[in-house]
Amino acid sequence: MLNLVFALAAAQNPQTLLDRVRAAIMSPKAPAWSSLRMTGKAQYFGIDEGYTLDAMPDGRFVQTFSGPITEKFACDGKTFWQVDRSRGVEKLDFEDRDRQTATELALTSRWLDANAPIVIGEDGDTLHLKLKDSGQEEILKIDPATHLPSEADLPISSGLLVIKLSEWKPAGDREVPSHVEITDGGLTDTISCDHIAAAQLPASEFEVPVWKPDDIFFDTSKPANVECKRAVSGHVLVHPLVDGKDLGWFILDSGAEVMCIDKATADDAKLPSIGREPVTGVGGNVVSSLRPIGEFELGPAMMKNVLFVDLDLSQLSGFFRVKIAGIVGADFFRRTIIAVDLKAPSVEISKRDGYSLSSGNWLPVRFSTGNPALEATIDGAPKAWYRFDLGANGFLTLHAPFVTKWKLLDGRETQPSMSGGAGGFVTARSGKLKWFELGGHRFNDVRVDFSTAKQGAFAEPYLAGNIGQDAMLPFRVVFDFSGYRIALVPRQ
């Protein structure tokens, strides 16, 4: 009977769904605020934190989680950026940019403003917000009783970013949700705001901070070259000290957005455990614990107060035929210059200050979910951005959406293949490309994987593919994450 009443009401009301939602959210007679501040509490990474959101009508915002794990996400009106839990500053791009855009639009109701970076469509009881920069769609589910959004969904590499919206309260000329639940990769963060007001931050607070890390130290008496070897899989292994202890070999991985430690190894070392974090790998999602470590030392560099994510790496240990204690990821890369020669093999770690290339040129880098990406081109598709992944064996894996978009399997002879990593294994097809070009170097007649994955890192649409170790063999590769650049120096 209730559904019939709603149906009759809708039939008698000629307004569109968008009109009804706009009428429910907006209060034309109330004055618009020139700024918005929402404060309260959050359950973030499974930990109780303080929460603040400052937002401006022109799209600038700063969202802060403060507590044992402090993080900040912001936009200065053009550039999206974050201060991550390791205190590092990173400009956000690709999926990360869309994630922050979708969240800010839903939390502030700014998606209804004329200057919002979206195109709005509707389908039944849902509104489709097409993000202008990427073409991805955020789906708003509308409560038929109140005509207020109850949920906002955005497809991402971990599956679906789900933002549940409730307890709407007035904020100037509109209503905003004061209670929000954000689910990503199997973990739900909650935000509850008990104070909503018009309070404006200084303009400088929205700008990308100038970052000079104060938690990395170099011992100039130690050589830049560090102990390393290649596993049977081709991965580069290094031998750090964790809180002064030798726990075993770590994978050096430019494609790891976090620092990782084997769970059993962390338990044996009696490392404390705090919070929870979802990790998205090739095969899907894994929810892990965070392990704080006082000192991480690799060669001449020592990083202090590091948060590791624990993962079960026993399967990798069996595959590599050596015990793998952890993974050196983006937090360390962002504070150093790392030069890798896979053929030698050799790894050099240097200070960022004053570093210069002895030969070769820098290539510009953009980041997606903490991973560096370079522009490259394949036969049969236009130039695109590819993840540059020192932790991936093989030559190249093309992402499933890119394969589908450019019909790269049509008429091509292929064989079944598999790709694996955190979260398990996914399907692919193995075949040949006529050529692949990276940094001015052309590889001819190369065998690559064409992913057919439905979830995980190889199913995300923002990047065209994943460049692996075999494509790095002709070069000495120099990583400068904080400089947003990578050099591919041809080997002599």
Image: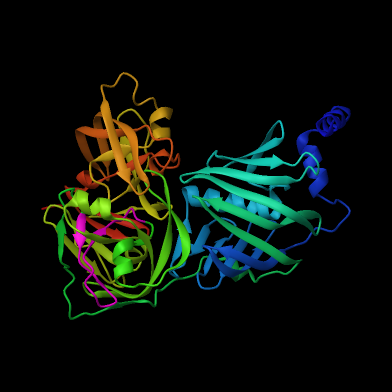
Residue drawn at (24%, 32%) of the image: 435
- The residues colored magenta run 236-256
Position of residue 406 measured from the top left corner of the image (x, y, whole percent): 40, 27
Compared with 453, 214 (above or below) is below
Position of residue 187 measured from the top left corner of the image (x, y, whole percent): 52, 54
Q: Where is residue 142, by image quadrant? A: top right
In front here: 344 or 422? 422
Q: Examine the structure image and report whether residue 245 is included in the region drawn in magenta.
A: yes
Q: Is residue 481 visible?
A: no
279 sits to left or right of 98: left
Compared with 437, 286 (above or below) is below
227 sits to left or right of 452: left
Compared with 289, 448 (above or below) is above
Q: Where is residue 212, by image quadrant? A: bottom left
Q: Examine the structure image and report whether residue 426 is included in the region drawn in magenta.
A: no
Position of residue 119 measured from the top left corner of the image (x, y, whole percent): 65, 38
Residue drawn at (58%, 41%) of the image: 132
